Amino acid sequence: MGKTTEQIHRNMAAVKSKNTRPEIIIRHYLWTHGFRYRLNVSRLPGHPDIVLKKYRTCIFVNGCFWHGHEGCDHFTIPKTNTAFWLAKITANKERDKEEQRQLAKMGWHCITVWECELKPKVRDKTLESLAFTINHIYLQDHSIHYRIPENEFDIAAEPDKR
Ligand SMILES: [Zn+2]
């Protein structure tokens, strides 16, 4: 079944606003588990939703429709204006990929969390594996690099300077 126009508008509204609920769920989890982060770091490609400097990791919290989560129930191309939506979402996906490629080149790790992975039934598992992944990244990086500069540890979650 295709999405109604109203559903599409709602999806788009959710995507455009900052502090969307899935993002807050992740932030809350990270904060209570001792991970410190910054939000919407505008000088990095793609303005990542959550940036963990100490872990050199960017987290993107993606809406399944807008970012085209493949194989996901929440991603159905509407039956009307199909070509338009297909082009739009394909372009979004290309952009996501390019941004993450640039971040990787700059030495950042990227983690994408999909909205559907934060539904109540699967949320705990998603968050646990997110924490596991972040810690794993840290250990791997630090088995290669000796240390990161002191100033990489500065206060988290304050507005981006600049
Ligand atoms: Zn999904």
Image: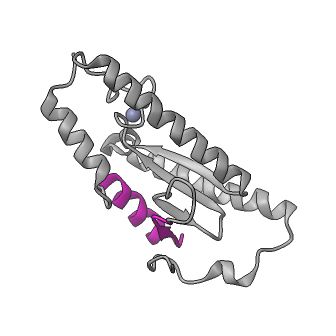
Left/right of residue 72 with respect to residue 108 in the rendered view? left
Pick whichever, 124 or 155, lies toward us: 155
Pick whichever, 51 or 6, lies toward us: 6
For the N terminus, the quadrant is top left
Q: Position of residue 112 (x, y in %)?
A: 52, 45
Pick whichever, 78 or 30, lies toward us: 78
Q: Quadrant of residue 89?
A: top left
Magenta span: 21-41
- Residue drawn at point x = 62 percent, y = 59 percent: 57
Q: Position of residue 136 (x, y in %)?
A: 69, 55
- Tell how many labels: 0
- Residue drawn at point x = 69 percent, y = 50 percent: 104
Q: Position of residue 138 (x, y in %)?
A: 71, 62
Can residue 76 be seen in this snapshot?
Answer: no
Answer above or below: position of 43 versus 60.
below
Q: Is residue 53 magenta?
A: no
Q: Is residue 34 magenta?
A: yes
Dividing the image into four quarters, tell me where ligand 1 lies. Answer: top left
Pick whichever, 85 or 39, lies toward us: 85
Q: Position of residue 25 (x, y in %)?
A: 36, 58
Can residue 39 be seen in this snapshot?
Answer: yes
- Residue drawn at point x = 44 percent, y = 78 percent: 159
Colour convention of the picture: one colour
- Residue drawn at point x = 36 percent, y = 37 percent: 66
